[in-house]
Image (tube, coloured by chain):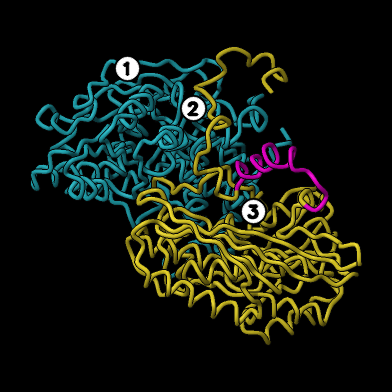
Chain colours: A cyan, B yellow
Amino acid sequence: MKYLSEYRDAELVHSTIKKIGDTVSQPWTIMEICGGQTHSIIRNGLDQLLPDEIELVHGPGCPVCVTPLELIDKALAIASQPDVIFTSYGDMLRVPGSEADLFSIRAQGGDIRVVYSPLDALKIAQENPDKEVVFFAIGFETTAPANVMSILQAEQLHINNFTILVSHVRVPQAIEVILGSPNNRVQGFLAAGHVCAVMGYWEYLLIAEKYQIPITVTGFEPLDIVQGILNTVESLESGEPVVKNAYIRAVTEQGNQAAQETINKVFESCDRKWRGIGVIPGSGWRLKPAYSAYDAELRFNVQTIQAEESPLCISGLVLQGIKKPAECEAFGTLCSPENPLGATMVSDEGACAAYYRYRNHNSR
Amino acid sequence: MKKELPSLEGPVCALPRSHKDKIVLGHGSGGKMMADLIRDTFYPPLSNPALLAGNDAGVVQLANGTRLAVSTDAHVVSPLFFRGGDIGKLAVCGTVNDVAMVGAKPLYLTASFILEEGLELSVLDNVVQSMKSAAEEAGVEIISGDTKVVAHGEADGLYISTTGVGMLDPDLNIGGAEAKPGDLVIISGTIGDHGIVVLEARGELGFETNLKSDIAPLNHLITAMLNVSNSIHVLRDPTRGGVATALNEISKQSGVGIILDENSLPIQPAVSAACEMLGFDPLYIANEGKLLAVISGKDVEKVLDVMKKTRYGENAVVIGEVVDSPRGRLLLKTGLGSTRIVDVLAGEMLPRIC
């Protein structure tokens, strides 16, 4: 495939890995923030090919994994109601809530549909005026523009039977939590390319400066990832805590400003709970009061639902890069993708699921 | 299970959902949930050697020494018609292929129809015509049938179940448990065409491709292969769950490892592109006119030669090898030279968020 196969070229990947080997002089721990990057690294076995000095740890950038338990419970409560069509990205259907998942609600007769975009959900609302259509608006900055666009279009087209259940999270605040932790081992970051395509990377300049840590904006194909690692290792070796852009075909410093303006029109910053981590101040987006008519939590009166996670699953530590999936004693035994104990095992982008799917989970 | 790890007793987690009390769609997806359902619900009460062999068709020997292969398959595709085929062609080819995958010559089919009140008769006519053509091509006859009608809303138009019977040579022993280290794995053509066409026909892609479903009767191809080699150990059609699921089953049944070579997988660009956009892996996408063959290395060249001369095997290619270990595992050597596990799907294949 044109514009993809070029970034999977084995020769180029290997020559870039050789450059990493030539550059590295000591062990470094680098975190890839995004679950899409984790998936690509494990799927392509990139970590097997890297020099031993480079340790990759997997960040909290899987939106499915970090969506808090109580939001799942709210989704289940809404989806169980009659005359509701509940729409979601596919991999949210399997995430366990306190007592069920969306699959079980569907088996009991709930009308739950997988969509690829909130605009598809909006179309369903248009076609079913006698139903309430709800879209589960999860994600990082990447999915925010489309979610916001669905609200603006609903307003413009006077579609009143459409609401969204919002659980948006933001990357820079999560990076700061990781860097502020006394247990932090991360010495450099691969920033999430698609998040930066929307937001730019100017926010990361402040983080690199404040924490004296190099950050490289990185894409998702094998060549993108090894190039991001090479740039980060060069910064680490030369002691320069700078931000570099290894995804210039998609990312500029200022990002997509039209998308940012649209987001700011509809969303405002809020504190947000992350599954496995806890509340991170200022790490979320929610609907502004002017758009509260599109807030599914208010429409269905589920604001009061609360839930606490079990302290036993270590997905929080995995999400912060402190532990690897195989260090969990439930990994691959009690906990597997068809029987997930924690969020990181649920989504294909979750670190535990990526390890389970592509690694020999019998070896610890 | 919880007793194995006492430290995790109590309210273990955010709540595992194993769906052991109710059927969900994942039970029908060909993945691990379905395998568990068969193992736990069907095998114990119905147990017999032909069933437990776990092949596409059950093989039995009659008192006079005749060996029969029998297979049955229910077809519930939506929509009923799509590019390259329809539910009628599927119902004939699916069962013909399942009978042929143990090396048997399919002879007769039966068909039962569940019709939804309100179905246009012209639709049924078209489906039956399509069954006729497919049966003629395969060289089988449909010798018995049954019709039931259910109330409007209680079915999705039309469901067809077919059962097939075939004769099997006395000395043939082809089955999932027969793969041996040193064997090579052949696929008869490109991977994933049918599954993507059906998604497209459902309007789920949001874009169009020029793909056609690969539905085809493969019994003549298999006859040609058996004519040149007596070292064909396993035949399987990678339908629901795709190549990854079929090879995982074979690796477990035979107690061997299988290593696929990513560079040699034949995948049409449109299938790759659709999978990239949707977050699917072509290895898990359904095929309806392809077979996997596990063959002794010495015979591979002549089997490939004869396959390539047939209509449904012209793109046949070696995609992997059977190894001693890790037993019961399917591995993939990536285009970059690293190795990863290709596991069975848990349940439904879910598109990723971004």
B49 is within the stretch colored magenta = yes
The range drawn in magenta is: B31-50
Circle 1 crowding by C-alpha within 10 Å: few under 14, some 14–19, many from 20: few
Q: Are marks 2 and 1 in contact (CB under 8 Å)?
A: no
Q: Secondary structure at mark 1?
A: loop
Q: Which mark is residue A320?
A: 2
Circle 3 crowding by C-alpha within 10 Å: few under 14, some 14–19, many from 20: many
Q: Is residue A214 visible?
A: no
- Residue indicated by mark 3: B245
Q: Is residue A276 above or below residue A198?
A: above
Q: Nearer the viewer, mark 3 or mark 2?
A: 3
Q: Amino acid at mark 3?
A: Thr
Q: Amino acid at mark 1?
A: Ile
Question: Image point 58% across, 71% down: which residue?
Answer: B190
B41 is within the stretch colored magenta = yes
Q: Left or right: where does residue B238 sit relative to residue B297? A: left
Q: Mark 2 and mark 1: span between their CA atoms?
A: 26 Å
Furthest residue in direction bottom, as rendered: B309
Q: Mark 3 and mark 1: span between their CA atoms?
A: 40 Å
Q: Are marks 2 and 1 on the same chain?
A: yes
Q: Amino acid at mark 2?
A: Gln
Residue B239: x, y in percent?
A: 59, 61
- Residue indicated by mark 1: A305
Q: Left or right: where does residue B305 sit relative to residue A302? A: right
Q: Which mark is residue B169?
A: none
Q: Nearer the viewer, mark 2 or mark 1?
A: 1
